[in-house]
Amino acid sequence: MHRFALTREPGSDLFRGLTTAGLGAPDLLMARAQHASYVAALREQGLEVTVLPALEGCPDACFVEDTAVIVPGLSVVTRPGAPSRRGETATIAAALPVDRPQVTIAAPGTLDGGDVLVVDRTCWIGLSGRTNAEGAGQLVEALAPLGLDCRLVPVGEGLHLKSSLSHLGGRRLLMTEQLAALDVFAGWDIMVVPAAEAYACNALWLDGRLLVPTGYPRTVALLAAKGLALLELDMSEYRKLDGGLTCLSLRF
């Protein structure tokens, strides 16, 4: 169960953020309002939320999930795959929990937290355009003493692994049809998102409630039919930057 969350305000240069979405530049005022609603939702679920100030000059810095991986017993400071994002990690490292040791991914390794999903004792690590084999290997080595079962996953579509994969509580996973065909998910209860609503794969499970992006009615219907308690949040401005619900916080 998560008790804390770390987030960061979007900066005035958010419109300069990296993107492949082709949806135009984000509206800063709307992005700030959406971020405030997101923080409020985390707090409503009982999380103690720290909101770091905007990091001007690092337009993608609000996507704090990419800068660290936090598990019981360890914090891992990443080395983002996009060189323009490597200036984000120092301030994140200083804000990470002090009750556990901290290690850092080293060059030539690259690792984005958006490529890492930890559920209980299982850790899936996506090999993507942002996370290379060296970075994934360093993470596996760091997590080995903790007894986690690490599994590498080729990311064939989407920016990160968690663009196409989310935890739904228990042994339930939400993913694209492409990922569902992989052996690394065998034995898990898989729900497949309709292809036209692939963005909805990035959902955020908060110990009994699932945050989902607005605008994906078929996915919402599938999830509601499973008895999941849902909260829909507008993520339109962050989608323009390839971002989603998990990207905006580090939970621990």
Image (cartoon, rainbow, N blue to C red):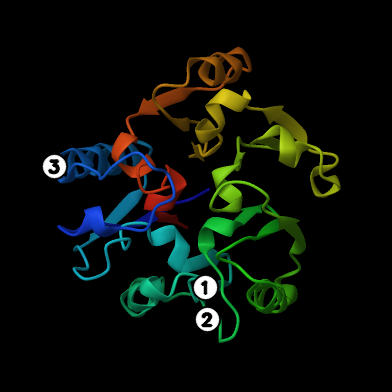
Q: Which residue is mark 3?
A: 29
User: Disc 1 on helix, strand or loop?
Assistant: strand
Which residue lies at the image location 74% right of the left edge and 32% below the top edge? Answer: 190
Q: Is 220 placed left or right of 138 in the picture? A: left
> Is residue 9 among what the camera can see?
no
Q: Are marks 2 and 3 in contact (CB under 8 Å)?
A: no
User: Disc 2 on helix, strand or loop?
Assistant: loop
- Residue at the far bottom in the pictured view: 107
Report, in whole angstroms, how far the alpha carbon at label 3 lies from the one at label 1.
Answer: 33 Å
Q: Are marks 2 and 1 in contact (CB under 8 Å)?
A: yes
User: Looking at the rendering, which quadrant does residue 24 occupy?
Assistant: top left
Which residue lies at the image location 67% right of the left edge and 71% below the top edge? Answer: 136
- Whichever of callouts 2 and 3 sits on the residue coming sooner in the sequence is 3
**Up-down relation of residue 26 to residue 208 (above or below):** below
Image coordinates for residue 130, horizontal then vertical, percent: 55, 65
Which residue lies at the image location 37% right of the left edge and 47% below the top edge? Answer: 47
In-front residue for pair 47/11? 11
Q: Amino acid at mark 3?
A: Leu
- Whichever of callouts 3 and 1 sits on the residue coming sooner in the sequence is 3
User: Disc 3 on helix, strand or loop?
Assistant: helix
In-front residue for pair 163/24? 24
Q: Is 214 placed left or right of 56 in the picture? A: right
Q: Is 69 placed left or right of 184 in the picture? A: left
In-front residue for pair 103/161? 161
Q: Which residue is mark 2?
A: 101
Image coordinates for residue 226, horizontal then vertical, percent: 63, 17
Q: Which residue is mark 1?
A: 75
**Up-down relation of residue 26 to residue 73 (above or below):** above
> Is residue 102 among what the camera can see?
yes
Q: Amino acid at mark 1?
A: Ser
